[in-house]
Amino acid sequence: MTKVYLAKPRGFCAGVVRAIDTVDIALKHFGTPLYVRKEIVHNQSVVEKFKARGVSFIDYLSEAPAGSRVIFSAHGVSPQIRQEAKKRDLKIIDATCPLVTKVHAEVHRYRKLGFAIVLIGHQDHDEVEGTLGEAPDIIQVVGTVEEVENLVVPDPDRVVALTQTTLSVDESKVMIDALRKKFPNLTTPPKDDICYATQNRQDAVKSLVGKGIDLLLVVGSQNSSNSQRLCEVAKALGVEAHLIDRATEIKEEWVSNKKCIGLTAGASAPEYLVEEVVAMLESLGAISEELNLIEEDVNFALPSEISDLVNDKTPLGSSEKTPLPTAQA
């Protein structure tokens, strides 16, 4: 009999709930046309459900007519994008995750102090592009130890390391150690930039591995950095892991002869997708059990641009308390 352990916490983080609620409320109050720059969160199902309701996802602000309403995604944007929006008289609603905004603020803080900034992350990720845009003249992005070794800065004693919020905790430590070896006086912010949800979900995966799972299934889209990292955490500990968007992507050879399967979801994956996987595995004879591994209770206020539109005192961050349209099958 196959056992399935469901990791908790999993799925939506407070920043994702905030971003999805932002689009939902804007859609209800303003209707269409409504534009979102990039994907509101990196999940295919969430994006497709909003498209079905008339939301237009665009890569460039020029795709939105002048004066129209545009939502910035949870990953943040550069000052250049904000300036372009102002020039085109766009009505902006900013759904940037507050934890990403924190990193942007750190860029300006250390710039004023005269530091060179090393941003640990993936060069082509939307979040990194936005952070880099805050000070492209003093930020260098590194994703490998080899890139660290090739860094050249004006003053080796005034270097600060910032981090993409969705990195692997272990990956970040390796990079920080490499940077500290090259720059012994390296400065890091008072609090780790990796977000609470990313860290909690990675720690939960490690706990699942400790339970003896021989397979980890991660529900999330391929362009979701934090979901990819969950697979990497398991693989680094010697456990087979696969990232799937839907239950239909599970291959029979993955689950056959497995005694214990771990199941989790990236921070942008809705719970109904997890439920689909559970239903499929149970149809094959598996027994599921939820493991409450880490307590998580974080909520973020709605963006100021739409907070006046609602009179809901229910805190965000819990799909059980505030069911989202995108969280329904």
Image (tube, grey):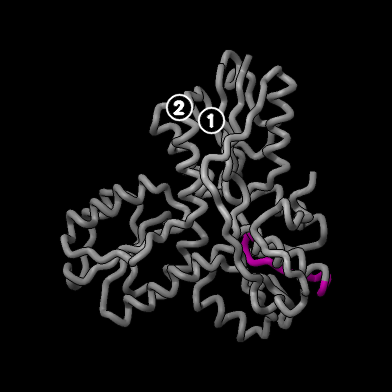
Indicate the position of residue 305 as horizontal and vertical percent values: 68, 79
Determine the secondary structure under disc 1: strand
Q: From the image, tell me which residue sits under label 1.
A: 216
Q: Which mark is residue 239?
A: 2
Q: Amino acid at mark 1?
A: Leu
Q: Residue at x 36, y 78 (%)?
A: 109
Left or right of residue 7, residue 282 in this image: right
Viewer-proximal residue, 228 or 1?
1
Q: Residue at x 53, y 68 (%)?
A: 98
Q: Quadrant of residue 182?
A: bottom left
In the rendering, at what x and y percent does residue 295 appear? 54, 48
On whether residue 166 falls in the magenta region, the answer is no
Q: Is residue 200 left or right of residue 147?
A: right
Magenta span of residues? 29-40
Q: Position of residue 165 (x, y in %)?
A: 46, 58
Q: Are marks 1 and 2 in contact (CB under 8 Å)?
A: yes
